[in-house]
Amino acid sequence: MVVSENVLSPSVKETLSLQHSRYHASFYGGTKIFQKIYSQTQELANKIFHCSHSIISPLSGNMAVLAVILALTKPDDKIAILPLSAGGYPINLEFLYRKRVNIPFNLDEYNIDLSTMLEIIAQEKPELIFLGSSLFLFSHPVQPIAKAVHEYGGIVAYDGSHVLGLIAGEQFQDPLKEGADLLLGSTHKSFPGPQGGVILSNGFYERELEEVIGAEPLEGIVLVDNIHNSRVAALGVAFEEFQHFGRNYARQVVINSKTLAQTLDSNTIPLHGKSNGFTESHQVIMKVQDFDEGAKLRDVLLDHRIVTDAAMRFGTAELTRLGLREEEMRIIGDCISQILRGLFKSQKLEPNVLKTINDKIDSLINLTQNAKL
Ligand SMILES: Cc1ncc(COP(=O)(O)O)c(C=O)c1O
């Protein structure tokens, strides 16, 4: 249930294991095939994300974020991003000599505080704004922010690392349509592809980005030299397959998250986003004091073979891909609740309760092992 992870289909896995030692650039002989695979994978990305340009060479979402910063800002520029406490991605801007502007967050709504954000934009005029986050429950207000930022020539990049599979399956906001200049992210979280990153757009800042991280850097290498052909080919296979199952998968991911959240809430487990219906994504987030408390709860759940993280985010993407539906979400929600409630009351679980939980988890694991991917 780690929100950043997913499962690969047999074809994606097989493709990932090919061509490891080959180079990509046209400088080398025998590489035409890899350039063809790259451009075919780009075409699939453009089709799925309804855009005209895609850069698929980043080795991770992190590198996509870094490429955008290096290509589109210079030292001392201001970059607006959510703080870590609001689930913002903890990129080290100070290390890059960029100035941080914190995006204000309304914890009750579990979303950006739009009116304060618009005031900050008017005052600070950050050169670059990152929307999107790591603790991501609800769509961000892209449209009004993009309108305000574009008035003074700023850039809006939407970090869809977490929700890329939901965007691809058209079950979350469409950031490019709503006015973001760039959509970037990881290809392995809610999107069930190989580990890697993408930057998608309708052609804005194409030249600047290509210089930093293009398939064949125009001049001077910055972030990627040799492209990992196996990863690109596997991404192409993942895109191709996603066209057939992606929409239903993404729809079920959201249904499963909501079902899990409702089950946990009815068992008095405190969750974020309650006033907005808990979640519209692949995540359900429990309220914890800090990552130390979260780590303790994570470890207790791990002892029962339920894998989460120290932010106590429960992810439904991988389980959905493995075929689990509402009924199983209710079972999982009940198991988690029993384990945590026992912990809160400092009570050891009765042996018969423990056995029931174990049996249920055994049967869920059996179910996932029969999944046809
Ligand atoms: C919002 C966000 N952006 C970027 C990243 C980095 O992604 P990757 O792990 O693909 O480098 C993460 C990682 O979890 C993230 O949460």
Image (tube, grey):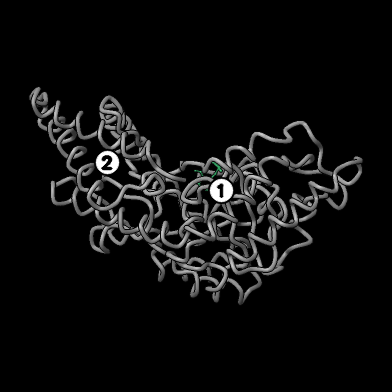
* Quadrant occupied by the N terminus: top left
Q: Secondary structure at mark 2?
A: loop
Other residues around mark 1 within 10 Å, as few (<14) / some (14–19) / many (≥20): many
Among the 4 quarters of the image, the one containing residue 42: bottom right
The answer to whether mark 2 and mark 1 are in CB contact below 8 A is no
Other residues around mark 2 within 10 Å, as few (<14) / some (14–19) / many (≥20): some
In front: 168, or 80?
168
Determine whether 128 is above or below 234 in the image. Answer: below
In the image, what residue occupies the spot 49% across and 55% down? 165
Determine whether 253 is above or below 122 in the image. Answer: above
x and y, in percent, of residue 311 in the image: 35, 40
- Image position of 37 (left or right of 253): right
x and y, in percent, of residue 153 in the image: 66, 72
Instruction: For residue 102, say whether it is visible.
Output: no
In the image, what residue occupies the spot 34% across and 43% down? 313
In front: 310, or 19?
19
Q: Secondary structure at mark 1?
A: strand
Among the 4 quarters of the image, the one containing residue 277: bottom left
Write down the residue under mark 2. Answer: 288
Three-letter amino acid code of the residue under disc 1: Ser
Write down the residue under mark 1. Answer: 186
Q: Nearer the viewer, mark 2 or mark 1?
A: 1
In the image, what residue occupies the spot 75% across and 42% down? 227
- Image position of 118 (left or right of 348): right
In front: 210, or 106?
210
Task: Give the spatial CA distance, label 2 vs label 1.
Answer: 26 Å
- Image position of 259 (left or right of 188): left
**Disc with the residue nearer the chain's start (2 vs 1):** 1
x and y, in percent, of residue 40 in the image: 72, 57
Q: Residue 357: which disc?
A: none
CB at disc 1 and ligand 1 closer than 8 Å: yes
